[in-house]
Image (cartoon, rainbow, N blue to C red):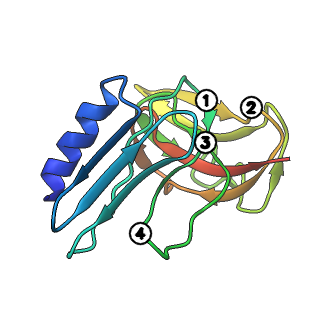
C-alpha cells in the first residue's frame, strides 16, 4: 500500500463513525484505531512507513495522544493539546520575544501556550489544566490544520 492509498484510507475513516479498521494481506498489515483511547496507526510492511491518523477534537481540546509506532519504537506518553483552527503556529508573542513555554516547564490552567494566527487574528491557545510540557510538536511559524497536535503534556 503506498502513501497516497494510506492517506485516502485514513481520510475515509476519520469522516465516519468507525472506531477501528484492520486490513491484513500477505505483505502488510494496517490497523487504525480512534476514539477516546490512544490512537494508533501501525504499518508493518517490507518498506518502513509510519503515519498518524488525524484527530477530530473539539476546539482547544486536550485529548489522548495520537501516536504512530512500529514494534520496538519508543511511545510518547501524555496527552496532546490540539489546534482548534487552521492557521500558523507561533511559540512567542513577537519574533524577538521569549517563547510562551519550553519543554519541561509547568504551566497553570489558563496560561497561554502559543498563538495560532488565522486571517490576521492572533488566537491564544491556553492550557485547560495544570500540566508539564513534555514535547513541542510543531516548529515556530509552521502551518497547522484543525486538530493537529501542538504540544504533548502531562497532567499534574
Label 4 neighbour load within 10 Å: few <14, some 14-19, many 20+: some
Label 2 neighbour load within 10 Å: few <14, some 14-19, many 20+: some
Label 1 neighbour load within 10 Å: few <14, some 14-19, many 20+: some
- Does the residue at mark 3 contact the one at mark 1 (Cβ under 8 Å)? no
Q: Nearer the viewer, residue 17 or 7?
A: 17
- Residue 150: x percent and y percent? 55, 46
Lateral position of residue 138 relative to residue 19, left or right? right
- Residue 14: x percent and y percent? 33, 31
- Residue 135: x percent and y percent? 63, 59
Residue occupied by mark 3: 64
Q: Spatial distance from mark 2 to mark 3, Cα to Cα?
A: 14 Å
Q: Residue at x 27, y 73 (%)?
A: 48
Residue occupied by mark 1: 61
Above or below, 24 relative to 127: below
Q: Nearer the viewer, residue 90 or 105?
A: 105
Q: Spatial distance from mark 2 to mark 4, Cα to Cα?
A: 31 Å
Residue occupied by mark 2: 128
Amino acid at each position: 500500500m503506498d502513501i497516497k492509498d494510506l492517506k485516502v484510507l485514513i481520510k475515509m475513516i476519520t469522516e465516519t463513525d468507525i472506531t477501528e479498521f484492520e486490513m491484513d494481506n500477505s505483505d502488510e498489515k494496517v490497523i487504525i484505531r480512534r476514539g477516546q483511547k490512544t490512537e494508533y496507526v501501525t504499518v508493518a510492511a517490507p518498506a518502513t512507513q509510519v503515519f498518524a491518523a488525524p484527530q477530530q477534537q473539539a476546539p482547544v481540546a486536550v485529548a489522548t495522544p495520537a501516536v504512530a509506532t512500529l514494534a520496538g519504537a519508543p511511545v510518547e506518553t501524555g496527552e496532546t493539546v490540539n489546534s482548534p483552527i487552521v492557521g500558523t503556529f507561533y511559540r512567542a508573542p513577537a519574533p524577538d520575544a521569549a517563547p510562551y513555554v519550553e519543554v519541561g516547564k509547568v504551566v497553570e490552567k489558563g496560561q497561554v501556550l502559543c498563538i495560532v494566527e488565522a486571517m490576521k487574528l492572533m488566537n491564544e491557545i491556553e492550557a485547560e489544566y495544570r500540566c508539564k510540557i513534555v514535547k513541542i510538536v510543531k516548529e515556530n511559524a509552521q502551518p497547522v490544520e484543525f486538530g493537529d497536535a501542538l504540544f504533548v503534556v502531562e497532567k499534574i
